[in-house]
Amino acid sequence: MKILGISGSPRKRGNTEILLRQALEAATEAGASVELLRAADYRIKPCEGCWGCQETGHCHIDDDMQPIYVKMLEASGIIFATPVYWFGMTGLLKVLIDRTNALAFPESRLQDKVGGVIVVAGRTAATLTSAQFYVYFSANHMLPGDYVHGYADRKGGIRRDKHAMKAASELGRQVVLLIKKGFEFPREYDVPIYRYVARKYDMPISLGDLK
């Protein structure tokens, strides 16, 4: 069992990474192997919206996202962590997530993996930011674990948020327990419902495709 922690913060050892490491440490204690991945350490180009992956199941862009695909597919659980930048996740993490569109074809290849969320805010938008991830989990048929919200206004200040520190540990442990308990989507639903309906009933997804 492997838990992959993905940090969207541009800061090494900052508040977001502190909480993520706390979660991964607890996951290790619960019996999982873990890996921390910093989006800032990788050269990831934005998605081009070409939809080539819809036909091939692979992204044609040859950059550092390719090994990240492998890590995500090998993991049984993925914990995303980000600070709040302009009321949402960082651009670094959004670009990475956009590129995972290739993992949705020909079927949802992140299906049945457990997802967790860690968000660090100065004051506002933690809930708004974490909600974005739960739409992502739903579309990929992942089992959502809980979320952790931490609050800090300077590097290292998150350690003063004792609740967030404890919650991060519990999230790491929870993700492992959810994996051990077992979860599986019905095989019939191997893609999101909007694509399933288009396939089953031969209906266009986009209004622009209507004749």
Image (tube, rainbow, N blue to C red):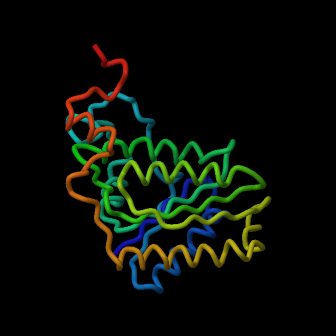
Q: Is residue 152 left or right of residue 98?
A: right
> Looking at the image, which residue is at 60% across and 46% down?
90
Vertical position of residue 182 compared to residue 112: above or below: below
Of the pair 179 and 187, the residue shown nearer to us:
187
Task: Name which residue lies at 37% across and 21% down.
Answer: 207
Identify which residue is drawn at 33% across, 53% down.
Answer: 69
Task: Point out the image quarter for the C terminus.
Answer: top left
Locate residue 77 relative to residue 153 in the image: left or right: left
Task: Name the quadrant containing residue 155.
Answer: bottom right
Residue 43, percent from left and from top: 45, 45
Q: Quadrant of residue 19?
A: bottom right
Q: Residue reaching furthest top?
A: 211
Give left or right: position of 42 versus 150: left
Indicate the position of residue 137 as horizontal and vertical percent values: 43, 54
Q: Residue furthest front?
A: 201
Rendered residue at 28%/46% (across/down): 191
Residue 141 in percent (x, y) is at 35, 55
Q: Quadrant of residue 163?
A: bottom right
